[in-house]
Amino acid sequence: MARRRTAFICQACGAEHPKWGGRCLSCGEWNTLVETVVEPTKPAARRGAPANGQSAPRPLTEVSADRFERIPLPIEEFNRVLGGGIVPGSLVLVGGDPGIGKSTLLLQAAATLAQDGQPVLYVSGEESAHQIRLRADRLRIHTPALYVLSETNLNAVLQHVEALAPRAVVVDSIQTVYAEELTSGPGSVSQVRECAARLLHVAKHRHVPIFLVGHVTKAGAIAGPRVLEHIVDVVLYLEGDRYHAYRLLRSVKNRFGSTNEVGVFEMASEGLVEVANPSEFFLAEYRSGAAGSAVAVTLEGSRPLLVEIQALTTTTPFPQPRRTANGIDANRLHLLLAVLSKRVGLRLHNQDVFVNVVGGLRIGEPAADLAVAVAIASNVHDRAVAPRTAFVGEIGLGGELRAVGRLEQRVAEAAKLGFRRCVVPRASRPFTPPEGVELITCRTVVEALRAAMAAEGKA
């Protein structure tokens, strides 16, 4: 019988090392090795491997795909991110900051799946059944087919899954369940990896979708070994500022669909509510005619969003001015300030610069560069941007405007919300804009700034 042994396992890639080191030799990450007690288990229990001949290879053409029809959810934003619905037998990992709404979203999804009378099992390792009932009452969920289980022992959970034969299973969270064959504590590298592997086996062989809630680290990544994200089929992140009402459900990995889709929700008293028109939501408090404000048309997945970008510049008494970015990358802001100083001639060396994306949204694509530059220049000159004007464009180091993708779709979204002028790069592929929309093409950021603050902008 093999004895227990101690090894150092990398939390990033799951590689095992005999002794501790500052850097993992497999993936190159620093400070990721954690001392873990490794105890061998029975081969059948370790991975849930079938002892019969079900694992025999078969020709691909003989494999039936009928049973893998998607299960549609009444929550359309959730459907969008999943790729059109839930695939039976899939293992879905949902991560996010504490209090962002992960448990609320999955409880709502479980309730909708149980509306037709088929049982759905919600397993919670962090809350009692009474606490879940209180949340369900707040969310107005009264579904008899939704079963609640407060349990952390994985073997007990799997026994209930076998007896109940549910339509779907939710495990909240993967860091709280444990396999009793291992001596390490819940949430350890070996426990998370083992529990995820056994749940994957159950999902595949019973064709039941399983949703896992995952804790995140300070950096925002899923806690535990990185191999957890490789095991599951879908990785979703619920993002947003807890002090704002909006939430974004973003797909990071999806074996059954695109990772370019984003679902938008609003946190209300009755739970997470779908936002039918996210652009209108983010521009709810937009006030045209204010200096230092511009509207960017950005893409979240395949969906265009209009967001307001505000900028404030003020003279600093200190030798080193401050650069504060909320909602955009700070390094990108430094790049844009350098271009505005060198190519446009704005005196920013003695100015504190603050940039904020209204609504708490975080923009990662460079197509919002032009709107950020316009907002900064508007505040420096204390001149308002022309009314009903939206901006799209990436700014290069030479001050040129570079083309962006799906420009026609962006302009169409701006037209729906009443914008009548769109400043875009001249290098973009030409197209016919919607009726009533003036397309202003510019080659450089200097031309774009002149067009942005033109007094004769159409109202």
Image (cartoon, rainbow, N blue to C red):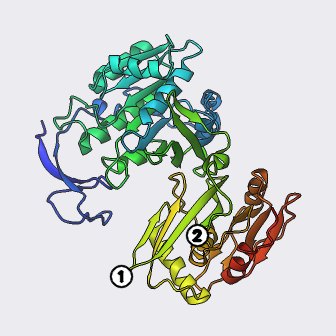
Q: Position of residue 301 (x, y in %)?
A: 61, 53
In the depicted view, which residue is nearer to us: 347 or 399? 347
10 Å crowding of disc 2: few (<14), some (14-19), many (20+): many
Q: Position of residue 348 (x, y in %)?
A: 49, 83
Q: Element at badge 2?
A: helix
Question: Is 156 placed above or below 227 here?
Answer: above
What is the count of numbered marks? 2
Which mark identifies residue 372? 2
Give the left or right position of residue 441, taking residue 42 as reference. right
10 Å crowding of disc 1: few (<14), some (14-19), many (20+): few
Q: Quadrant of the N terminus?
A: top left
In the depicted view, which residue is nearer to us: 330 or 150? 330
Between discs 2 and 1, the one toward the N terminus: 1
Q: Depth-wise, is mark 2 or mark 1 nearer the camera? A: 1
What amino acid is labelled 1 in the image?
Gln
Q: Quadrant of the C terminus?
A: bottom right
Q: Position of residue 426 (x, y in %)?
A: 77, 77
What amino acid is labelled 2 in the image?
Val
Question: Is 366 placed above or below 221 here?
Answer: below
Q: Element at badge 1?
A: loop
Residue hosting label 1? 320
Q: Are marks 2 and 1 in contact (CB under 8 Å)?
A: no
Give the image quarter of residue 341: bottom right
Question: Is 399 placed above or below 134 here?
Answer: below
Residue located at (51% from left, 57% from top) = 362
Which mark identifies residue 186? none
Residue located at (59% from left, 68% from top) = 292
Residue located at (30% from left, 47% from top) = 224
In the depicted view, which residue is nearer to us: 197 or 172? 172
Question: Is 369 placed above or below 253 here?
Answer: below
